[in-house]
Image (spheres, rainbow, N blue to C red):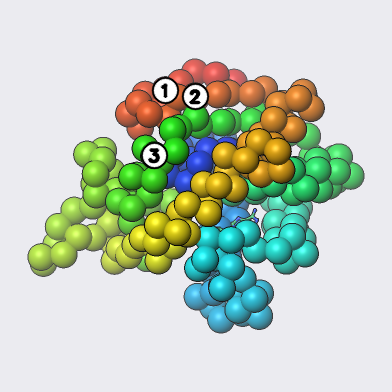
Amino acid sequence: MAVNILAFGPNGSGKGTQGAIVKEKYNIDHIESGAIFREHIKGGTELGMKAKAFIERGDLVPDEITIPMVLETLKKSKAKGWLLDGFPRSLAQAEALDKALKEADMPLNYVIEILLDRQIAKDRIMGRRLCANDNNHPNHIAFEAIKPVEKDGKLVCRVCGGDLSARADDQDEDAIGKRHDIYYDEKTGTMAAVNYFKKAGGAKVISVDGSTSIKAVTETIMSQLA
Ligand code: AMP
């Protein structure tokens, strides 16, 4: 049976790294709203062009673009199951998602929440690097376990040797600040979305301290997944 998971955590909490591991366990699709946007921008699509300026500033892309894009992707993964990362980021998105999941008969099995102090999350964001070949190849210049390797005098992906880049919005302190303002907002932001799904019941909630090592976080999560 398909397993459906929501992954929450501030940017820089290791959510993407852990998501890539959990996805392997169940062989489900890893759906990252931010990565879908970046693909559209790379491909020069109309959606990408609309989203680009919002992303560069660290603002949310408007719901009328984001919500249908994500819901459509989820439906395509219904048979396989999915781990959704980066959505919902607001209370309004949480409500829209809840409604759509009920209508599509896609029950939520787990809510994984990685807890991390805002300053630590900020420091971590600036050191992460994106692999040009695979979004699921985590690289970070400050973490031994996922450090890029050196080849011909430059740093390349530790998994496949692919080119690495830093996201522009990861090197811009204003953009990071805005993304974290949205995340930690318990009234209408991402924390409100987390609390919405915690209160809704149904799914098992796994809350884990993200300040420990990557391995320790993985072990805590794995020990609570069936
Ligand atoms: P991420 O890769 O999750 O850090 O997302 C990068 C950027 O994509 C965010 O800063 C937003 O501009 C945009 N984005 C990603 N997910 C969403 C979402 N659920 N709602 C609105 N904008 C989003």
Q: Pick whichever, 35 or 52, lies toward us.
A: 52
- What amino acid is labelled 2 in the image? Val
Pointer 2 or 3: first along the chain: 3
Q: Amino acid at mark 3?
A: Gln
The yes-or-no answer for disc 3 within 8 Å of ligand 1 is no
- Crowding near pointer 1: few (<14 within 10 Å), some, many (20+)? few
Q: Nearer the viewer, residue 32 or 29?
A: 32
Residue 168 visible in the displayed image: yes
Three-letter amino acid code at the position of disc 1: Glu
Which residue sits at x=69%, y=30%? 195
Q: Position of residue 84 (x, y in %)?
A: 62, 45
Report helix, strand or loop for mark 1.
Answer: helix
Residue 119's label in the rendered image is 3
Q: Secondary structure at mark 3?
A: helix
x, y percent for residue 40: 58, 72
- Look at the numbered discs 3 and 1 and tell me whether their residues touch, using CB distance below 8 Å: no
Label 3 near label 2: C-beta < 8 Å? no
Q: Report the Cα–Cα distance between label 1 and label 2.
A: 10 Å
Query: Front-most of 211 and 69?
Result: 211
Q: From the image, which quarter does the N terminus lie in?
A: top right
Residue drawn at point x = 44 percent, y = 38 percent: 118
Asked whether mark 1 and ligand 1 are closer than 8 Å, the reply comes as: no
Where does label 1 land, which residue? Answer: 219
Residue 138 in sight here: no
Which marked residue is nearer to the observer: mark 2 or mark 3? 3
Quadrant of residue 27 in the image?
top right
Work out how far the residue at label 2 is from the one at label 3, CA to CA, in angstroms: 17 Å
Q: Earlier in the sequence, mark 1 or mark 2?
A: 2
Name the residue: 22% across, 39% down.
144
Residue 62: name its quadrant: bottom right
Which badge, 3 or 1, is on the more N-terminal residue? 3
**Which residue is identified by label 2?**
208
